[in-house]
């Protein structure tokens, strides 16, 4: 590969990476809190009902433009939906300084709120990020993703439940068959031993 071709390939890769980063930034909310900039959204965009996802938090020091590490030790997070809320453990993302997440499977479509409280390097934090503000995505229904048509999430759940019941019944019958087979071997072994004893004592 010539130098010009390598330069062209590197330029294309850089452009793609820039577009990806811009798309992620557009799906997240950026907010300045004191000397920090917090970027919040879902780890997977768009977020779908019943699909594994997680909250995404990035922290940058505005003065130095450097990512802030160690915030998972002093900062806490809650996920809120309607009148329900749950505190979730923040963890640092491996090999991504300043990035934090917590796993969640959103069970309902609609708007979610992420509440962060505690402190970052001694600065008090108490901020709520709401997808209803339109700065990051609400959770969407998955019905439109199923193919062929008619296999909705509810129907799929019923199918999975029925399959689990059948599997459980099959497992029960299988265990029963193994037990009966083992008993048969024991009975057969006892009968064989009795026959050997009788044969040995016969004149």
Image (tube, helix red, strand yellow):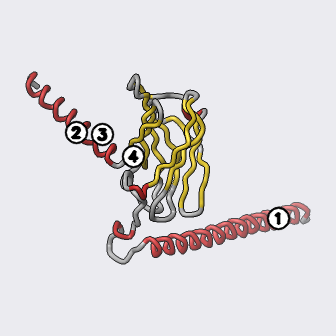
Image quadrant assignment for residue 145: bottom left
How far separated are the C-alphas under marks 4 and 2? 22 Å
Which of the marked residues, 2 or 1, is nearer the chain's N terminus?
2
Please rate how many residues cluster around mark 4, counting C-alpha atoms within 10 Å: few if below 14, some from 14 to 19, many from 20. many
Residue 16's label in the rendered image is 2
Cα distance between the residues tagged 2 and 3: 9 Å
Q: What is the quadrant of the N terminus in the image?
A: top left
- Name the residue beneath numbered marker 1: 190
| Picture residue at 40% right of the left edge, 24% below the top | 63
Q: Residue at x 51, y 56 (%)?
A: 105
Q: Secondary structure at mark 2?
A: helix
Q: Nearer the viewer, mark 4 or mark 2?
A: 4
Instruction: Kindly indicate whether the residue at mark 2 contacts the one at mark 4 (C-beta within 8 angstroms).
Output: no
Give the x, y percent position of residue 108: 49, 65
191 or 127: nearer the eye?
Answer: 127
Residue at point 40%, 66% (across, down): 142
Q: Is any atom of residue 29 visible in this view?
A: yes
Separation of disc 2 and disc 1 at Cα? 75 Å
Q: Please say if the residues under marks 4 and 3 sit with CB atoms less than 8 Å apart.
A: no
Query: In the picture shown, does residue 38 fall above or below 132?
Result: above
N-term-proximal mark, 2 vs 3? 2
Q: Along the polypeptide, which appears first: circle 4 or circle 3? A: 3
Give the CA separation, mark 3 to mark 1.
74 Å
Vertical placement of 183 versus 15: above or below? Answer: below
Mark 3 secondary-structure assignment = helix
Instruction: Please state which of residues 151 and 174 is positioned toward the viewer in this rendering.
Output: 151
- Determine which of the numbered discs, if any, sits on residue 29 in the image: 4
Q: Which residue is mark 3?
A: 21
Asked whether residue 47 is in view, the answer is no
Q: What mark, if any, has residue 140 been given in the picture?
A: none
Task: Tell me residue 198's x, y (percent).
Answer: 88, 66
């Amino acid at each position: 590969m010539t130098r010009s071709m390598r330069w062209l390939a590197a330029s294309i890769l850089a452009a793609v990476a820039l577009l990806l980063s811009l798309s992620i930034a557009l799906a997240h909310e950026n907010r300045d809190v004191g000397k920090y900039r917090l970027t919040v959204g879902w780890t997977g965009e768009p977020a779908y009902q019943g699909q594994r996802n997680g909250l995404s938090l990035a922290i940058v020091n505005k003065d130095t433009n450097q990512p802030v590490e160690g915030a998972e030790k002093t900062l806490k997070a809650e996920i809120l939906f309607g009148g329900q809320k749950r505190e979730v453990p923040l963890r640092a993302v491996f090999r991504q300084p300043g990035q934090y997440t917590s796993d969640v499977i959103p069970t309902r479509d609609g708007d979610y709120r992420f509440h962060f409280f505690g402190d970052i390097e001694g600065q008090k934090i108490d901020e709520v990020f709401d997808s209803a503000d339109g700065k990051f995505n609400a959770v969407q229904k998955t019905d439109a993703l199923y193919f062929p048509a008619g296999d909705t999430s509810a129907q799929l759940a019923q199918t999975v439940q029925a399959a689990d019941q059948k599997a459980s019944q099959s497992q029960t019958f299988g265990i029963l068959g193994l037990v009966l087979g083992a008993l048969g071997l024991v009975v057969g072994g006892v009968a064989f031993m009795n026959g050997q004893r009788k044969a040995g004592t016969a004149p």
